[in-house]
Amino acid sequence: MHLPSFLWLWKIAAWSMGLSTLAYLLLAVTGFWMWRVKNHQDVPHFVLSSWGTLRLWRSLHYTMGISMVSLVLLLLAIGIVGTLGHFGSLGHSSHLWAGLAVVGLVLISAFSATQISSRRSWARTLHISVNIILFFGFTWVSLTGWSVVQKYLP
């Protein structure tokens, strides 16, 4: 496929990856505060008075989660379109496997989040465990992505 430069596509990918990482960090913070508020774990008074409702933390957490899922799926689409457009086929580096692993982990995390309830104690454990593994997945995809970026730079 003979198309013009894909530089604009890689700029979108770079922003999406940066925002995905930011969303991941914000999810960790909101998840931690949800746990603290829910368990009344030494929460400072100013936090309880203005940010103390579990509903608020859950809403922020879900909003960030939906954002991260959307960004990761956007990255998947960009990677497929850009690689097929530039090389004509997939699988030129381990970045494909790292990316697919991250997409899978993000989708498992999102699914497990929808299952969390008092009757399904496994869901919270799965959600937290997958998100710990996702840290290493994001690290892997970032490192392999850096090597891919070097192929596209003039």
Image: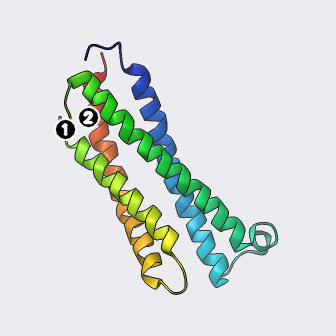
Residue 11 in percent (x, y) is at: 44, 27
Identify the residue shown where x is 74% and y is 72%. 53
- Give whichever of discs 2 and 1 has the lower sequence position: 1
| Above or below, comparing residue 143 to residue 105 in the picture | above
Q: Residues within 10 Å of mark 2 (few under 14, many from 20)?
A: few
Residue 83 - label: none
Give yes or no for contact between labels 2 and 1 (Cβ–Cβ under 8 Å).
yes
Task: Give amino acid for label 2.
Answer: Ser
Q: Which-is-in-front pick, marks 2 and 1?
A: 1
* Quarter of the C terminus within the rendering: top left
Q: Residues within 10 Å of mark 1 (few under 14, many from 20)?
A: few
Q: Which residue is mark 1?
A: 93
| Above or below, comparing residue 87 to residue 142 in the picture | above
Q: Which residue is mark 2?
A: 147
| In the displayed structure image, the side of residue 98 where residue 134 appears, left or right | right
Identify the residue shown where x is 36% and y is 41%. 76
| In the displayed structure image, the side of residue 1 where residue 126 appears, left or right | right
Q: Which SS class for mark 1? A: loop
Residue 100 in percent (x, y) is at: 29, 49
Identify the residue shown where x is 34% and y is 56%. 104
| In the displayed structure image, the side of residue 94 where residue 85 appears, left or right | right
Task: Give amino acid for label 1.
Answer: Ser
